Amino acid sequence: MVEGGIAKADKTEFTECWRTTWKTPYIMRLALSAGIGGLLFGYDTGVISGALLFIKEDFDEVEKKTWLQSTIVSMAVAGAIVGAAVGGWINDRFGRRMSILIADVLFLIGAIVMAFAPAPWVIIVGRIFVGFGVGMASMTSPLYISEASPARIRGALVSTNGLLITGGQFFSYLINLAFVHTPGTWRWMLGVAGVPAIVQFVLMLSLPESPRWLYRKDRVAESRAILERIYPAEEVEAEMEALKESVEAEKADEAIIGDSFGAKIKGAFGNPVVRRGLAAGITVQVAQQFVGINTVMYYSPSIVQFAGYASNSTAMALSLITSGLNAIGSIVSMMFVDRYGRRKLMIISMFGIISCLIILATVFSQAAIHAPKIDALESTTFSPNATCPAFAPLATPNAPPSGWNCMKCLRSECGFCASGVQPYAPGACVVLSDDMKASCHSKGRTYFKDGCPSKFGFLAIVFLGLYIVVYAPGMGTVPWIVNSEIYPLRYRGIGGGIAAVSNWVSNLIVSESFLSLTHALGSSGTFLLFAGFSAVGLFFIWLLVPETKGLQFEEVEKLLEAGYKPSLLRRRNKAKGVDTA
C-alpha cells in the first residue's frame, strides 16, 4: 500500500515479462500449465463450427432443423453457465488447482461421449459435459495465473491464457481441415479434445495450489514457499505483509456475515467494494459477448458461406485465417496490456468493433441486393420436380416473379444452382436436397444453400478478419484479466464465478439466437444489431471500469473503496464544487 491513495502504475514493457520469466522460468511453467485450460476452452468452442457442417451431412434431422443445430452449439454454453457458477464455489472451497483437475476430467468425458455418439442427442449430452469443463476453466485458469504472477507482469501472463484460448480455436480449425476427408470426420474433430485434457491433468498434479488461496486457508508456510519461487527474495516479505493485511480484513468481515455459500453471496452484494468490482466485471463480460464474437467463432464457416463461398473446405480454410488473426491479436494484447492499460485497450477495441460491424452490415446488405437473378425457364425445366415449391406457382417462362433473386430463393428454404457460364449470372431456384445438390454438381455448377455467389464476398472476409484484429487485443483477452484482479481475495472465486456466469448466459443468448436472427433479419440486420449492442457496451465500459494495470490486488481494493468515476465526470463534479463555493 502507499500513503495518500493508490500509486500510479508504471508503464511495463512487454520485454519485462520475458525478462522476469527467463530469470524465473517457474512462473511461466505455472502460467502455461494452467493456460492449457484456455487451450481446451478455445478448442471446444471453436471445433464445433467445422464439425457441425459434417454432423448435418450424417444426420438429416440436424440438416433440416435450425433449432437442433443451434442446440448442439449452445448446449456447451449452457453447461458452461453451470460450470462457471459451481466453479466459483469449488475455487473458494477446494482451491484453484482442484478446480482445474475437475475441469480436465469433464473435458475428457465430454470428448469421449461426442466421439462415439450414435445420435444427435448424445452429441448434445457430450457438449454439456464439455460445457461444464469450459465454464470452470474459463474462470479458474486466469485466476490461478493471476494469483501466481508478480503484479508488474500480471496482465501479460494472464494474456497467455487468452493466447491459448485463441490458439485452441486456431488449432481446432487445423484439426477440422485435417479430418475433412477422413472417415468419421466430426467424431475425430470432437474426440481430439481429450488429449490436451490428459496432458494438463498430469502437469497440474505436479504444480502447487495458488499461494493466495493457501494463505487464506492458514497454510502460511506453503504460501511463503511458493512466493519465494515467484518473487525476488527482497520482495517476498512485502507480499506476505500485503496478504496478511488483506486476509485479516476479510476474516473480520467473515466473523460478521459467516462463511457459508449463501453468506458469501449475500456478503458480496452487501460489500460496496465487491459490488463495484462486479459492476465492472459483469459489464466487460456481457459486452464481450454482445459484440457478437462467438457467433463468428462458432459459425464462421457458415458466415463465410453466407458471404458466397459454398464449399465446406473453402469455408473452413477461410475460417482458419480469421482464427489465426484472433491468435495474433492475443499476442498484441500481451505486448500492450501492461503498457497502455486494460481500460484503454478495451475502449479502442470497441470503437474498431463498432466500425467493422457497420461495414459488414453494409457489405451483406449490398450482397443481398445484388444477388444473382433467378432464371425462370431453367428453374422450371432443370429436372423433374426440381423447382422450388415457393417459386413454382409464381413462375412463367422467361419471367421470374418480381423481387426474386438468389437470396429470396434461399430464404424460401430452397437451393440455388449457379450458372455454369458466369458465376454471377442468373441461375436456377431448385429444391433443397442432397439429390439436387448432386445433380447441380454433376452439371459442373455450384450449389448454394446458405449464401449466394457475390462480388462482395471477398470484402466480407476482409472486414470479418479486421473485426477479429480489433477485437482480440482488447475485448478478447482484457475482460478475463480484469475479472482475475478486481475482486478482494475472499470474494475472488465467487466474484469471478458470477461474472463468468454472466458471460456464458450472454454467450448462450447470442449463439442460440444467431441463426434465427440471420433468417429473420438477414446477415446485414444481425450485424447492425450487434453494432448497436456494442455501442451500449462501450458506454458502460467507459462509465464503470477503472484502470488496474500494475496495481497490487490490495491497491485495486483501495481504488474500489474510494469509488470510480471517469475523468470527465470527475472534472465536471470538481467544476460544480468550485461554482458552488
Image (cartoon, rainbow, N blue to C red):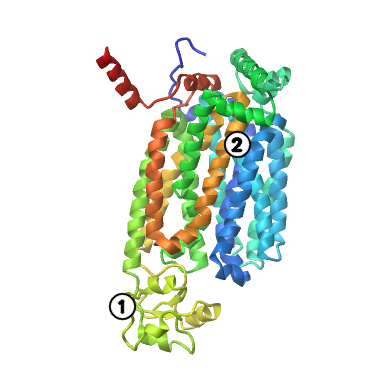
525 w.r.t. 401: above or below? above
Q: Which residue is mark 1?
A: 402
Disc 2/disc 1 C-alpha distance (Å): 54 Å
Q: Quadrant of residue 58?
A: bottom right
Identified at 48% across, 81% down, the residue is 440
Task: Judge left or right: residue 250 versus residue 2.
Answer: right
Residue 365 x, y percent position in the rendering: 34, 62
Nearer the observer, 159 or 538 = 538
- The amino acid beneath tag 2 is Gly
Nearer the observer, 121 or 100 = 121
Numbered tag placed on residue 497 in the rendering: 2
Q: Residue furthest top?
A: 3
Specify whether residue 84 is in view. Answer: yes
Numbered tag placed on residue 338 in the rendering: none
Nearer the observer, 384 or 551 = 384
Nearer the observer, 29 or 271 = 271
Identified at 44% across, 27% down, the residue is 547
291 w.r.t. 49: above or below? above
475 w.r.t. 109: above or below? above
SS of the residue at dot 1? loop
- The amino acid beneath tag 1 is Ser
SS of the residue at dot 2? helix
Residue 435 x, y percent position in the rendering: 54, 81
